[in-house]
Amino acid sequence: MADYDYDLFVIGAGSGGVRAARLTALDGKKVAVAEEYRVGGTCVIRGCVPKKFMVMASEVSHALEIAEGYGWSFADARFDWPTFLEAKDVEIARLSGIYAANLGKAGVELVHGRAVLKDAHTVEIVGKDRTITAEKILIATGGRPWKPDELPGIEHAITSEEAFHLPEMPKRILIAGGGYIAVEFAGIFAGLGVETTLIYRGPNILRGFDDDVRAHLAGEIEKRGIKVILGCQHEKIEKTETGLVNHLENGMKLETDVVMFATGRIPYVKDLGLENAGVELNEAGAIKVDPFSKTTADNIWAVGDVTDRMNLTPVAIREAVAFHQTVYRDNPQHFDYEAVATAVFSQPPVGVVGLSEAEARRSCSNGVDVYVTRFRPMKYAFTGSDERVLMKLVVDADSQRVVGVHIVGPDSPEMIQLAAIAVKAGLTKAQWDATCAVHPTMAEELVTLKEKQSGATSAG
C-alpha cells in the first residue's frame, strides 16, 4: 500500500468535518483537517449560533411590551449594539476554541490554510508551501451566500455574513429573500428597532413549507412591524448621499441605510481543484455523492452543505457519523432524511417535522385527515395582544399515522423536537390522543385536537 502522510485528510472544519475527523482519530487513524478561516464553520462562526444570539437579543423588546401588560414598567430600557457585538464575538471565539481543543484532544492535526486538491490523494495548502498526501479525503467545505451579481448596484448590498459585523445599527433596512434566513433577520432587525422591509419575488414567504404555515407567519410578522412586499424584486440599487435607493420592479422606490440579500446559499466548491481529483458536480453545482456520501472519486467523500442534500447542521453531523461507520468501522450506514425536524427562528418561530399537507396529499394514496387550531396563547391573552398560534397535524387517512406536524408560535422549536420523536416512530393519531395533556400549556393542543378540518380527507 502506498505510504501517505495521513489516513484521512478533511477539508473544512465545520460541524461535519470536525465530527468525522475526531471519530476517525479516536479510532487510531492519523488525521488532519484544514480550515481556511476559523474552526467551527458556518454554524458556529457565521450562522445558526450567532444568529440565535441575535434572535434572543431582539426578542427582548417584545418581551418588554408583554411585561408591561403584567404590571412591569421600564423607564429607560435601551439596546447598545457595540456592547452586544463584543459579547457575541467573545462567545463565538470561546466556542471556536472548544472545537479546536477537541480536535487536539482527539489527536487531529489542525492545518490553518486553504486546501486545494492536486489529485485524488494530494492536497496543497495555498500560500504555505506545503503539500500533503492522504489515503482518503473528506470534503466538508459547506456553503456560502449567493447574490445576483448581474443586478446593478449589488456591490452596495450585504449578505448574512456581513450582518453579524455591521459597524453600527442601521435605522432602515431592506432584506431581499423569502427563506428562513431572510425571515429570521427581518425579525432580528425589527426587534432591535430598525425600520424593516422584507421583499420577496414569490407569492409568499418560506417556499417549501406548509401553505398554512406560510400564510400564518406572513400575517404574524407584519404584526411585529415588518413591511412585507411579495411578488416583486429589485431592478437596481442606487447609492445616494442619504442612503441606498431600492428601485423595485413594481415601480416603488424605497430608501434604506442597508440592503441585505438573503436569496439562498450555494455549495462552496470554487477553486477546490475538484476536477484534478475526478470529483464531479451535480446539476445544482453541488458535489455529487452516493447514499453513503462517496463522490465520483473512489477515495474521496463529502458531507454537509457542500453536497446540498439537507442543509442543516445536525444532518451534517449525522452524515459524518455515517461516513465514519461506513469507511472505518466496516458498518455501512447512510443517513435517513425522512421526518427530520427543523425550526425557523422567526418572530414568532416555526417548528416543522414531516410532510406538508400538499406533500401528504400527493403521497398518501387514500387522502389525509387534517387537524388545525389557531388560538391566542394564554400569555398574550392576559395582555390583550392579538398574536395567534397555529398548530396543524397532517394524518394519513389509511394508516392514521401522523405524518406532519406544523407549529407557528412561541417555543415551537422546543416542541417540535419532541414531536419529531413521535412522527419518526410512526405513531398514530389515536396514540397522540391517548397521551394525557399537560395543562396549562400550548403544547397540550397537540394531543387534544379532535375535530378534522372540514373536507380535509380526500384522495391525493
Image (spheres, rainbow, N blue to C red):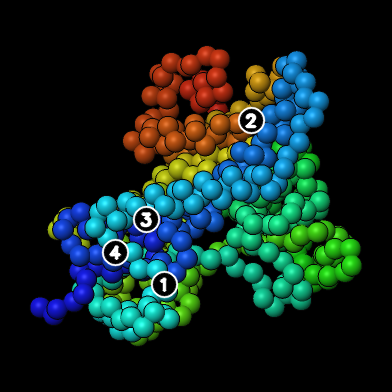
Residue at 86% from the left image edge and 60% from the top image edge: 255
Label 1 vs 3, first from the N-terminus: 3
Q: Is residue 179 above or below residue 361?
A: below
Furthest residue toward left: 1
Residue 246 lies, in percent from the top left, at 82, 65
Q: Is residue 372 above or below residue 167?
A: above
On residue 372, the disc is none
Label 2 vs 1, first from the N-terminus: 1
In the rendered view, does 316 fall on the left or right side of 69? left
Q: Which residue is mark 3?
A: 100
Report the amino acid beneath label 4: Glu
Label 2 vs 3, first from the N-terminus: 3
On residue 109, the disc is 4
57 or 220: nearer the viewer: 57
Mark 4: give few (<14), some (14-19) or many (20+) Cα within 10 Å. Answer: some
Report the amino acid beneath label 1: Gly
**Cα distance in 3D space between marks 2 and 3:** 41 Å
Report the amino acid beneath label 3: Ala
**Cα distance in 3D space between marks 1 and 3:** 14 Å
On residue 113, the disc is 1
Q: Which residue is mark 2?
A: 389
Task: Give the structural element (helix, strand or loop) at label 1.
Answer: loop
